[in-house]
Image: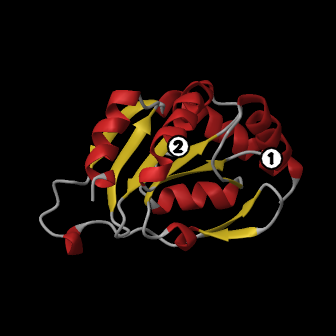
Amino acid sequence: MSSAKTIALVLVAAVLGAAGGFGGYALYDNRQTQAEALRRPDFVLLDLQGRPQNVAQWDGKVLLLNFWGTWCPPCVREIPLLVELQREFGDRGLQIVGIALDRPADAQAFAEKVGINYPLLYGVQDAMEVSQQYGNDAGTLPFTVVIDRDGIVRHVFRKEVERAELETALTPLLSN
């Protein structure tokens, strides 16, 4: 992909993220059976060292996927909360994975600056396609997905998340 095309895609995602960052929140808990629920789509993205990482490696954990960008103010604001939650709930089975729609050097510099304590994956077009598999048709950022230990998508947040919202979503899943 040419650098001009990459920059254009990032700019489009930024505009959509700024416009959609105030968007809604969908709850998947109201499904009648797990068969009706959205099963976690499989994907492989690169980590910041350029190694492919498959989401399946975190099966059996409560998984929080957070799609973000260093250029997205609501994304940047919620990262410290995610760092806190990983520290507080990691021993109870929570695994946060950040997916940066960014260049790896930018994501790495930001991660070091704020002390991100969870795995980071990255991509531009590939990461956006993964977010679409999880229901982010509008391309909004931040976009956060909570998946239970059985691989069922339970919560989708199409906006900057707050601690109370995440604790309400995570606590019952971490009790299992």
Mark 2 residue crowding within 10 angstroms, few (<14) / some (14–19) / many (20+): many
Q: How far from the left and from the top, in percent, is residue 146?
A: 40, 52
Label 1: element kind: loop
Q: In the rendered structure, which amino acid carries the disc numbered 2?
A: Gln
Q: Which residue is mark 1?
A: 103
In this rendering, the answer to whether 99 lies above or below 157 is below
In the picture shown, does residue 70 fall above or below 147? above
Q: Residue 156, image x and y in percent?
A: 37, 47
Q: Locate residue 122 relative to residue 156 in the image: left or right.
A: right
- At a point 42% along the width and 39% down the height, the residue shown is 158
Q: Amino acid at mark 1?
A: Arg
The residue under the point 62% across, 24% down is 73
Q: Quadrant of residue 60?
A: bottom left
Give the percent coordinates (x, y) of residue 68.
Answer: 61, 41
Regarding residue 141, the answer to whether it shows in the image is: no
Tally of numbered tags: 2
Q: Is residue 34 visible?
A: yes
Q: Quadrant of the N terminus?
A: bottom right
Q: Is residue 123 left or right of residue 66?
A: right
- For label 2, the residue is 86
Alpha-carbon distance for marks 1 and 2?
A: 23 Å
Pick whichever, 127 or 46, lies toward us. Answer: 46
Give the quadrant of residue 40: bottom left
Residue at image location 50% in from the left, 49% down from the top: 90
